[in-house]
């Protein structure tokens, strides 16, 4: 029944009401694939029509959590990154990525997320210890990863940690 309201609310351009209707549908939805579609639609409406990046980020956080183990996780991660930056939510992005990285089964995607956590820790959070931790985890998975190797070299140089610099 709620889906019948979508075209009416879209025609009226009542985006706030449409987002409310979708929220109700998300809460009632038991099908994970359909719920991901609803979360994606709510995020698009929030970002594009309501110009509310923070609200869109909230939907994308929920969608990213649910997309772990699904083939479209990479698309959610792209949206998460974009909206985190545009809404100033980089700390929340890093927290979410740290929460889900262990549950990601695809090795390439997991490596990309480890590197994303490390890069965001270094650039947005200015947390060189966290950055080092995740660059090292990336190297455990991919010992020849040049991005992680070069980043660790810079971190160790900046900290004056000569012993660790020699290990890189």
Image (cartoon, grey):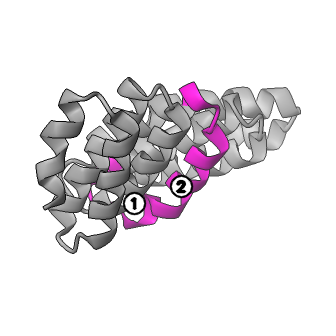
Q: Is residue 104 magenta?
A: yes
Q: Residue at x 68, y 44 (%)?
A: 132
- Could you tell me which quadrant the C terminus lies in? top right
16 over 39 or under it: above or below: above
Instruction: Specify the principal SS of the magenta part.
Output: helix
Tell me how many marks there are.
2
Q: Residue 86's image quarter?
A: top right
Query: x, y percentage for residue 126?
Result: 77, 34
Query: x, y percentage for residue 77?
Result: 37, 41
Q: Which residue is mark 1?
A: 65
Q: Taking the image as drawn, is residue 108 in sight?
A: no
Q: Are marks 2 and 1 in contact (CB under 8 Å)?
A: yes
**Image check: 83 left or right of 33?**
right
**Image check: 152 left or right of 29?**
right
Q: Is residue 7 magenta?
A: no
Dot 1 falls on a residue whose secondary structure is helix
Q: Earlier in the sequence, mark 2 or mark 1?
A: 1
146 over 59 or under it: above or below: above
Residues in magenta, as a range: 85-109
- Could you tell me which quadrant the N terminus lies in? bottom left
Dot 2 falls on a residue whose secondary structure is helix
Query: x, y percentage for residue 53?
Result: 51, 32
């Amino acid at each position: 029944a709620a889906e019948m309201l979508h075209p009416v609310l879209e025609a009226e351009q009542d985006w706030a009401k449409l987002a409310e209707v979708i929220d109700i549908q998300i809460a009632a939805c038991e099908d994970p694939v359909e719920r991901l579609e609803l979360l994606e639609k709510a995020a698009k409406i929030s970002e594009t029509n309501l110009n509310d990046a923070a609200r869109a980020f909230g939907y994308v956080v929920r969608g990213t959590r649910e997309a772990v183990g699904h083939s479209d996780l990479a698309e959610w991660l792209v949206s998460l990154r974009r909206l985190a930056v545009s809404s100033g939510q980089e700390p929340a992005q890093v927290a979410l990525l740290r929460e889900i990285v262990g549950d990601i089964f695809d090795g390439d995607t997991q490596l990309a997320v480890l590197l994303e956590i490390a890069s965001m820790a270094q650039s947005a959070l200015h947390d060189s210890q966290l950055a080092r931790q995740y660059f090292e985890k990336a190297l455990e998975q991919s010992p020849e990863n040049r991005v992680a190797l070069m980043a660790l070299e810079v971190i160790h140089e900046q900290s004056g940690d000569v012993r660790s610099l020699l290990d890189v």
